[in-house]
Amino acid sequence: MTNLQRLSSREECERLICYVPPRRLLGEVGLGLLVSLVWLAGGLPAAEPNGDPAVSGELYVRVKQTAVEVLVDDHLKGSGNMIAAEGLAITAAHVIGRPGARVELLSPLAGRRKAEVVAVDLGHDLALLRAESREGGYPFLPLANALPPAGGEVYLVGTPIFRHAVMFRGIVACETPTFEHLNPGYVAVLTLAATVPSGTSGGAWVDRQGALIGVQSGVMSNNGIPVGVSFAGLVSGVQRLLETQQTASTPNLGTAVEETWQQGRDILDRFPPQTEGLIVKVLQADGPAARGGLKQFDLIIEVDGQAVRLPDELLRRVRQKKPGESVSLTVLGPDGTGKRQVVVTLGRLETGWPEPAADGKGQ
């Protein structure tokens, strides 16, 4: 059995949180250095990565200056990085945990600073923070214009299990982003071949040119043991938060699904041979899908009239819409019969967080 584990504190290191296709579900959805930096005036020029350990060591020193540690109600919960000179920092939304938490940042340059949550994007597992101002500002990471190709090296400096400023290396493991289920819903992520422990959540992954390409969100584990696959919230979400400084409005279907060929015989034998689609494994309690009439173990075979057999096909369609809009699902009952239409009015993942402006985008 393979599960996804989120990383933010020592306690969470032992807790299996959610669902990763093609893996098994645990629990309910109810209710995520080789760097050149954009430096402030007077900073050192950026070195060019060339694979030389001396270069990576120099760049480690540089990126360490942008790294922060995130305190939530006085507890060290995760990592983060400055992304603007005026004190804007990025971390994972699950590090903050809930609206109204008291947040502080530990900076190697500025010490302990009060911070406020400016905006969140749960569809990318991101939180934008603003630290108290500092004379001269803060050194910060630039954002990448494009994701590295599969096989590209990436790096992170974070705080694993309360050890400070530790550097990790990973490899981009898939050529395109995908979706992983992280409570309370699906997160758009970049998949990395990397093993990072608890406490690194919210730390910035950067490419060989030193630009932020994602924010550490979660890891895959097998029976509680990490298997060397990590997930990072996408830089596109970071860019949107930085530009708008408004909480996202991410459409939420309120279910977690698995592909038919992942299933055991107890489920496969309910359907005709070679039936393809998405098995409804978990329903958010009183969530949009449940209210629309979707049932556990229903098989989704079409979304808005288009055949689906992979979770990403369904989720990309959902993410093209806005909360309050509808999606039409063609489903078979748990016994493989009773074909019917289920119309679901999409909810919003960020319920409970500040509302976006009327023209805010949540994609």
Image (cartoon, grey):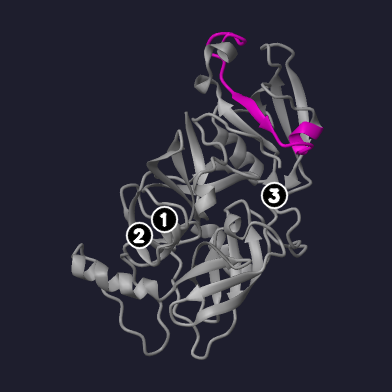
Q: Please provide the residue range marked out in magenta.
A: 269-291
The amino acid beneath tag 3 is Leu
Q: Is residue 50 rendered to the left or right of residue 1?
A: left
Using the numbered discs, state the Cα–Cα distance from disc 3 to disc 2 in whole angstroms: 29 Å
Q: Is mark 2 on a helix, strand or loop?
A: strand
Q: What element carries label 3?
A: loop
Give the mark toward the camera: 1 or 2. Answer: 2
| 124 to 81, vertically: above or below | above
| 306 to 164, vertically: above or below | above
For marks 3 and 2 on the same chain, the one whose residue lies earlier in the sequence = 2
Q: Name the residue under label 1.
A: 147
**Image point (70%, 11%), residue name:** 337
The amino acid beneath tag 2 is Tyr
Q: What element carries label 1?
A: loop
| 98 to 19, vertically: above or below | below
- The image position of residue 51, as x and y in percent, is 20, 62
The amino acid beneath tag 1 is Leu
Q: Name the residue under label 3.
A: 349
- The image position of residue 133, as x and y in percent, is 58, 85
Q: Mark 2 points at which residue?
A: 155
**Image point (49%, 48%), residue name:** 13
Q: Residues within 10 Å of mark 1 (few under 14, many from 20)?
A: many
For marks 1 and 2 on the same chain, the one whose residue lies earlier in the sequence = 1
Evaluate if marks 3 and 2 touch, with contact meaning CB atoms under 8 Å apart.
no
Q: In which quarter of the image is residue 280?
A: top right
